[in-house]
Amino acid sequence: MSQDLSAAARDHLWMHFTRLSAYTGEQAGEVPVIVRGSGPYIYDQHGKRYLDGLSGLFVVQTGHGRTELAEAAAKQAAELAYFPVWSYAHPTAVELAERLAALAPGDLNRVFFTTGGSEAVESAWKLARNYFKLTGKPMKTKAISRAVAYHGTTMGALSITGLPLLKQQYEPLVPSTMRVPNTNYYRRPDESMSEEQFGVWAADRIAEAIEFEGPDTVACVYLEPVQNAGGCFPPPPGYFQRVREICDRYDVLLVSDEVICAFGRLGEYFGSQRYGYTPDIITCAKGLTSGYVPLGAMIASERLVEPFLTGSASFAHGITFGGHPVASAVALTNLDIFEREDLNGHVRAQTGLFRSYLERLLDLPIVGDVRGDGYFFGIELVKDKATKATFDDAESDRLLRGFLSQALFDAGLYCRADDRGDPVVQLAPPLICEEPHFAEIEQILRAVLSEAWTRI
């Protein structure tokens, strides 16, 4: 049966972001089929166990196999399986919207549900444009984001994304987006910069971009609390406070893209709370339901809804499955688990220990930097630690796809070996993980990265 599943996957399942050639031809590998999960572990079709070092895809915050979440879905499906929130409401969407509004920072009280992160990002750009048109500033349409930042795959979200190789086969994309530097302190332009100085420099590039484009044309800035693509770039101290000042000065909306960073990944319900800033919009998804069903949201401040509260104005945007009754019920139960088990507190208490295990790997010649926050870390790989020399494209391809990804998986660790930017290994385990899991991650990484160095 397991062989049948793998063969059927090869022949019929179009896997996302996958080189399908890896599973075709005489030398093709078997498609891994994950059939079960329990706590922080997953199991393949052969019964082999792997530590889920990426929470599926930065998603399974509360761990696998939570029957409580499955039962919440079944109970709601039996009562009301589906109804849209297009001019109507249903109890679980109402309750979840109220609960998210209470958890979100500042006056972010209006919750627009989607089914995922890309849709939330897309919704935020549409809202920003619509808002400025209704408030007499119709030229404010442009979006700013950071280099190497990933914001989604829909055409608007992809346009905001700062990864050229992901975009070029779909061009032309939505116009009026531009990039500013990210917060990769390891690759800062001036080695003499302190973290605070680097933060000021990076934030000021946003003001510079707004001035260059014209403040009357820029609608919004998209920033992740910790940038994912490129390998977990945390913000320097004071960075977001300065960005907030810049956005206020130019009347530009600050969109905090927290599709990954919300719901405990950084030890708070929202990453903006971790770094002490209040955005105008939060986009979120993934951990909202711990991945048990798809659900996302755009959470907006009260001032952004005001133009829609009178007259004939309507935000002419909607998603069939946004605010799905079953997904909303699962999200509510997921938040109950967060509260009951204090998962945010657990992450805050354990993040230093998790970091310390990963930093042990800095004694390896291939490990240049360890960075991140909460349960969200990246390990940058280098050819030369002294010069920070990185791998060229061909070397990176051989290292990551030719060896590391498969070797880590074979060794029992599911994580991400990525080269969107410089080569990195990313770790984002379920929030229930503790020291034995950190030790297991470090041991596997040490063995595989040591072997990788011998192959360079």
Image (cartoon, rainbow, N blue to C red):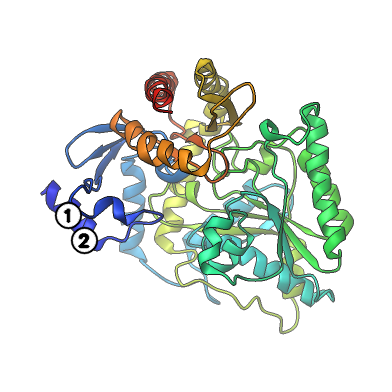
Closest to the observer, 348 or 6? 6
Q: Quadrant of residue 98?
A: bottom right
> Which element carries disc 1, helix, strand or loop?
helix
Q: Is residue 90 above or below residue 417?
A: below
- Return the x and y of residue 249 as percentages of the image width and height: 89, 55
Q: Is residue 450 above or below residue 342?
A: above
- Return the x and y of residue 19 as percentages of the image width and height: 36, 54
Which residue in the structure is indicated by mark 1?
A: 7
Confirm or deny contact between disc 2 and disc 1 (CB under 8 A).
Answer: yes
- Residue 1 lies left or right of residue 107; in this view the side is left
Q: Amino acid at mark 1?
A: Ala
Q: Which mark is residue 199?
A: none
Which residue in the structure is indicated by mark 2?
A: 11
Closest to the observer, 77 or 317? 317
- Return the x and y of residue 420 as percentages of the image width and height: 54, 46
- Residue 35 lies left or right of residue 154; in this view the side is left
Q: Is residue 84 visible?
A: yes
Q: Amino acid at mark 2?
A: Asp
- Residue 137 lies left or right of residue 20; in this view the side is right
Which residue does the image show at 55% across and 22% down from the upper left? 355
